[in-house]
Structure formats: structure tokens, C-alpha cells
Image: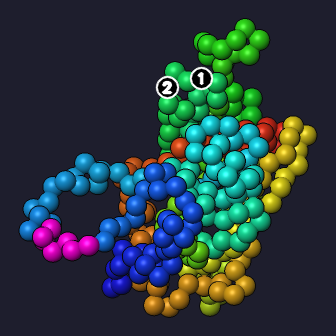
């Protein structure tokens, strides 16, 4: 069987440019690997190494984001100032994946629905995410799917602008970045609120892919993404336009075993509730901040 991690490392080595080449700020970037002689480490690796035990309890995948006009804090603010609106980025490492309107390519490895209770954007007293669940029968899921219950006031805020919890349904696609400088990275593309309908369209498009008369596995399909501007009654924002890749609609045959194995690992992590989408600044970074006029589309 092809080792998926070996495949990731192969793609990273073939496609990763240096920080100097990309004119990135090294302090803002998390190193992917290290050079130099590591032979001395052999005595410390293997079955006797227990240093990763705590980290192995969870599998955390970073969420892809789009810089918006309302990105006003943290790495997203810096990335918006540096690359403009409509850029595709990984906020947690301040990495630029694609500029506005530029195409990047992904393979969807695994899909799941997540329900999140978000704290008010003006409330700085705790984490932005109050609680998450995969359970569609949970109270958070019920409120997220009920247009009249998605917002809930709680103590705090100004008299004329009380704080409100927001309950949201997220369509999460764990994807493998299939081209560019960061080919081989795994990331989450999440659709909610104004872009929820785009997410449902993507699931339908994937379901229509056929091989020999049967539905093709999601992890065999390749898709082109690019950002485009949306216009709404309460503001404009950027979302994703998605098309099946015309140049390479399928992964390569020699990659199939590795992608299938990774899909099964993700599915196992999901069932064991170890899979975590790192939404980061997800309550303020994207379409969710300005697309309230489209909430009727979230059925």
C-alpha cells in the first residue's frame, strides 16, 4: 500500500519554495520540515518515543479562509492589507494559497456536517466558539437549522446592541491541496450562512461524478476553486466558484491507494470524535460577517 505521508512529503519537496523566494516573513510562518544531519535522532525515535501521545488524541485540520473587507484583526487583517480582498489564505500560518480570482486545485477527501455555537463578535471574554457538535439532534443543531432560533441574546454588550450567540451549520470538506507551492497540505473548506448554498451545490456536483455507471469516490475527484465577488442587500463579499478540473478531473492511478487510506483514516477520526476543524477567526473572517441577507437559503 502506498504510504500517504510519504506521498505528502514527496509533493511538498517537489513544490515548496523557500520563504525568501516567496518574500514571506519567517516569524509568521510555521516551518514544515528541517534540514541537516538527523542520524543522531535514531536512538530516540520509534516505539520508545512517547512525546506525541497527547497530540495523537486529536486530528486538527486548519480552515481555509478568504480575506474580506471586514477582516479587521489578527493574521487575516495583515493578510488583507498585504494581498487585498478576495485572497485565499491559511490564517493560522499566514500563508497565501491563491490571490483574488486565481485558481487552485483540491481533492475532497472527506465530508461532514458540523454545528457550532459562536460567541458574539464583540464579546472578547472567551473563545469565539462556545460549543461544537456533529450530532444533528443536539440543541445547537436544532437552533442552527431553525431560522427563528439562530440568534440568541445573552448578557453583555451595549444597551442598543446586546450580545447574541449565533448557531450555525457548517458543511466541512477536508481537502488535499493538489497544486501550487503548498501542494500536499490538508485543509478544511467550510461553507456556512451566505455560502451554505454553494456548499450544497458542491456536494451535488461531487455526487454526479460517475465511473463505470457508479458514483465515483469523492477522493478520486479533482476540483478547481477560485474566489469571486458576491453582492447582497447588506454588503458585498467574496466566495468560491467551483468547477470540475478539465485538465485532470481525476487523481493519478498510482495515488489511489494512498488517498483511499487517508479517507478511511479521516472517517475513523470523525466517528471517534477526534477530528477538529480549526476555524480560527471563523466568526469574523469571511462571508459570515456580511451575508445575513442570504440566510433564507439555509434550509
Above or below for 28 versus 206: above
Is 77 in front, or is 286? 77
- Residue under the image location 62 percent in, 91 percent down: 212
Q: What percent of the width, then of the height, locates residue 104? A: 66, 71
Tell me which corner region of the image, top left, top right, bottom left or bottom right, holds residue 199: bottom right
Report the disc number at residue 244: none
Look at the numbered disc 1 and give the secondary structure of its residue.
Answer: loop
Look at the numbered disc 2 and give the secondary structure of its residue.
Answer: loop
Above or below for 176 versus 287: below
Q: What percent of the width, then of the height, locates residue 235? A: 86, 41
Residue stretch in magenta: 36-42
Mark pair 1, 2: CA separation: 7 Å
Instruction: Confirm or deny contact between disc 1 and disc 2 (CB under 8 A).
Output: yes
Quadrant the N terminus occupies: bottom left
Residue 193 appears in the figure: no
Tell me the colour scheme of the image: rainbow
Report the disc number at residue 126: 2
Residue occupied by mark 1: 123
Is 271 in front, or is 243? 243
Q: Residues within 10 Å of mark 2 (few under 14, many from 20)?
A: few
Residue 139 is inside the magenta segment: no
Left or right of 131, for residue 96: right
Amino acid at each position: 500500500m502506498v504510504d500517504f505521508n510519504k506521498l505528502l512529503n514527496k509533493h511538498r519537496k517537489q513544490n515548496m519554495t523557500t520563504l525568501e523566494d516567496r518574500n514571506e516573513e519567517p516569524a509568521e510562518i510555521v516551518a514544515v520540515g528541517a534540514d541537516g544531519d538527523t542520524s543522531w535522532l535514531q536512538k530516540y525515535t520509534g516505539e520508545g518515543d512517547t512525546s506525541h501521545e497527547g497530540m495523537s488524541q486529536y486530528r486538527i485540520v486548519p480552515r481555509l479562509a478568504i480575506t474580506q473587507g471586514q477582516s479587521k484583526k489578527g493574521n487575516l487583517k495583515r493578510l488583507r492589507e498585504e494581498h487585498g480582498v478576495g485572497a485565499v489564505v491559511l490564517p493560522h500560518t499566514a500563508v497565501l494559497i491563491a490571490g483574488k480570482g486565481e485558481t487552485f486545485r483540491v481533492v475532497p477527501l472527506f465530508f461532514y456536517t458540523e454545528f457550532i455555537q459562536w460567541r458574539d463578535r464583540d464579546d472578547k471574554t472567551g473563545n469565539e466558539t462556545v460549543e461544537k457538535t456533529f450530532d444533528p439532534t443536539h440543541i445547537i443543531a436544532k437552533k442552527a437549522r431553525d431560522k427563528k432560533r439562530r440568534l440568541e441574546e445573552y448578557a453583555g454588550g451595549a444597551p442598543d446592541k446586546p450580545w447574541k450567540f449565533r448557531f450555525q451549520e457548517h458543511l466541512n470538506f477536508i481537502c488535499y491541496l493538489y497544486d501550487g507551492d503548498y501542494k500536499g497540505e490538508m485543509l478544511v473548506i467550510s461553507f456556512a450562512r451566505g455560502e451554505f448554498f454553494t456548499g450544497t451545490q458542491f456536494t451535488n456536483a461531487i455526487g454526479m461524478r460517475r465511473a463505470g455507471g457508479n458514483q465515483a469516490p469523492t477522493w478520486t475527484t479533482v476540483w478547481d476553486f477560485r474566489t469571486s465577488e458576491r453582492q447582497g442587500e447588506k454588503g458585498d463579499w467574496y466566495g468560491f466558484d467551483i468547477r470540475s478540473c478539465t485538465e485532470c478531473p481525476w487523481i493519478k492511478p498510482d495515488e489511489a491507494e494512498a488517498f483511499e487510506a487517508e479517507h478511511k483514516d479521516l472517517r475513523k477520526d470523525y466517528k471517534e470524535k477526534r477530528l477538529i476543524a480549526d476555524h480560527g477567526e471563523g466568526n469574523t473572517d469571511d462571508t459570515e460577517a456580511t451575508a445575513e441577507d442570504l440566510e433564507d437559503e439555509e434550509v
